[in-house]
Image: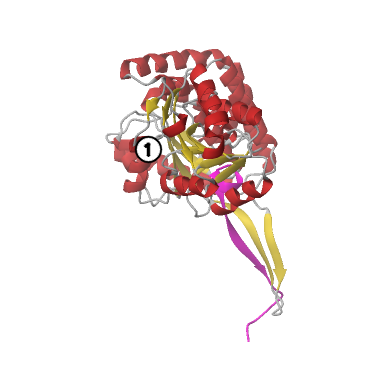
């Protein structure tokens, strides 16, 4: 990387190089992209000790910055998490190449044959906080979908992201693909983010992955289109026909497996008919697991904290959950519509009609029945990895994998065909 006298000149250079790389990726073969990802996976594993050492610098930076335990957990890499990155790269590599897929085809009376086929978006800017594994996930998915990417990791994950990025570049070199296909902004300067958000000549879409503050900033300031979700205000509704053991298992997993991810449960709604029995049992189990419960009504006990209006619609990202009884399924749906973020919501019930009603009346990006909300993840959806969870209603929704990072174009074929 050559020296630049300003952030704008640095970012313009990254943008120009990404644009040129994206043109070459448009016609890169599926075999080349597969080879690049396999080589990158090998490089990540072979350099795992260097990546973990770099991560230690980031953890120290995070401690000095006063990051919460949940954010420190997001930041931390160990050998198992490095293995997870490797597995994600390999899974994306083995997926079908989405570029060129025929989405629809038809013939017209005029004699034209028309196809709608997948095509890359072009250049994607990914802005993320804390989780250095996003470097691998985003790089892999953008490459698989034929897009160049400019990555901007959080300042706290700077060293880890740099080490992981170097492995991705090794993969590109091994497959004879342009190194500029995956670029990492080489500075912690926040001015680089502001530049990236307005580079309409070079960047086709921005994907922010982080907390409400980051995503809100991106949505306010971006002149480039954005795939985003503000928060994961994840609800679990326990219906009167819920199975007690399934409910205990799912709620505990949804809240406690990893509290700092966007699929972690943040609010528990319990049908009033089972609030005093199953509801109280679930609260006790959560407390036994170390969860702080902010409860209302019959769900409260001598160790809960009184829930207030501020607890509804709050993303705790910590070992805290809000809970309240509701009159029925429609009251639960009304609460979720009022306070939810259209991310992921779950119903626990053995009544298939109730589950169908829940699915029909809510429009969250992901709706679940008798399953932990921690499955709100592209890898668990068979995508290998995800670049984020989109909660908007345009283009991409839910886990954004390789296929969601494409647009389409029409291929129209005639035989000297003219229009009357």
Color style of the picture = secondary structure
Q: Left of 201 or right of it: where is 378?
A: right
Q: Can residue 199 be seen here?
A: yes
State yes or no: residue 361 in magenta.
no
Q: Left of 379 or right of it: where is 161?
A: left
Magenta span: 397-420
- In this rendering, the answer to whether 337 lies above or below 346 is below
Regarding mark 1 in the picture, which secondary structure is present there? helix
Which residue is identified by label 1? Answer: 212
Residue 405 appears at what percent x and percent y? 55, 47
Tell me the residue at 51%/31% (across/down): 264
**For residue 41, which quarter of the picture?**
top right
- Which of the image's four quarters has the C terminus? bottom right
Q: How many marks?
A: 1
Q: Nearer the viewer, residue 337 or 282?
A: 282
Q: Nearer the viewer, residue 74 or 5?
A: 74
State yes or no: residue 416 in magenta.
yes
- Which of the image's four quarters has the N terminus? top left
Q: Nearer the viewer, residue 182 or 369?
A: 369
**For residue 171, which quarter of the picture?**
top right
Q: Can residue 26 be seen here?
A: no
């Amino acid at each position: 990387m050559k020296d630049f006298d300003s952030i704008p000149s640095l970012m313009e250079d990254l943008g120009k190089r990404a644009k040129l790389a994206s043109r070459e990726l448009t016609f890169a073969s599926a075999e080349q992209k597969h080879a690049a990802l396999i080589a990158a996976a090998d490089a990540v594993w072979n350099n795992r000790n260097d990546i973990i050492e770099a991560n230690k610098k980031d953890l120290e930076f995070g401690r000095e910055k006063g990051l919460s335990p949940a954010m420190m957990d997001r930041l931390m890499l160990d050998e198992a998490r490095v293995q997870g990155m490797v597995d994600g790269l390999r899974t994306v590599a083995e997926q079908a190449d989405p570029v060129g897929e025929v989405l629809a085809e038809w013939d017209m009376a005029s004699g034209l044959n028309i196809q709608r086929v997948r095509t890359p978006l072009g250049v994607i800017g990914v802005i993320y906080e804390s989780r250095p594994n996003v470097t691998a996930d985003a790089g892999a998915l953008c490459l698989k979908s034929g897009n160049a990417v400019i990555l901007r990791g959080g300042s706290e994950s700077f060293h880890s992201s740099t080490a992981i990025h170097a492995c991705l570049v090794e993969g590109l070199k091994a497959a004879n693909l342009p190194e500029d296909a995956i670029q990492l902004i080489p500075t912690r300067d926040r001015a680089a983010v502001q530049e990236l958000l307005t580079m309409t000549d070079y960047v086709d879409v921005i994907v922010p992955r982080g907390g409400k503050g980051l995503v809100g900033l991106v949505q306010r300031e971006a002149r480039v289109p954005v795939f985003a979700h503000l928060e994961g205000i994840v609800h679990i509704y326990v219906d009167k026909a819920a199975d007690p053991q399934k409910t205990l298992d799912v709620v505990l997993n949804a809240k406690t497996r990893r509290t700092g991810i966007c699929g972690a449960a943040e609010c528990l709604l319990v049908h009033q008919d089972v609030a005093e029995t199953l509801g109280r049992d679930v609260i006790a189990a959560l407390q036994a697991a170390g969860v702080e419960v902010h409860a209302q009504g019959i769900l409260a006990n001598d160790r809960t904290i009184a829930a207030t209006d501020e607890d509804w619609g709050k993303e705790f990202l910590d070992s805290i959950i809000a809970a309240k009884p509701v009159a029925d399924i429609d009251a639960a749906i009304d609460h979720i519509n009022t306070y939810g973020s259209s991310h992921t919501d779950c119903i626990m019930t053995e009544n298939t009609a109730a589950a169908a009603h829940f699915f029909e009346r809510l429009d969250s990006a992901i709706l679940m029945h008798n399953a932990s909300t921690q499955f709100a993840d592209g890898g668990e959806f068979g995508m290998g990895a995800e670049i984020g969870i989109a909660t908007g209603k345009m283009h991409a929704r839910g886990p954004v994998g390789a296929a969601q990072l494409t647009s389409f174009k029409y291929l129209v074929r005639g035989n000297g065909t003219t229009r009357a």
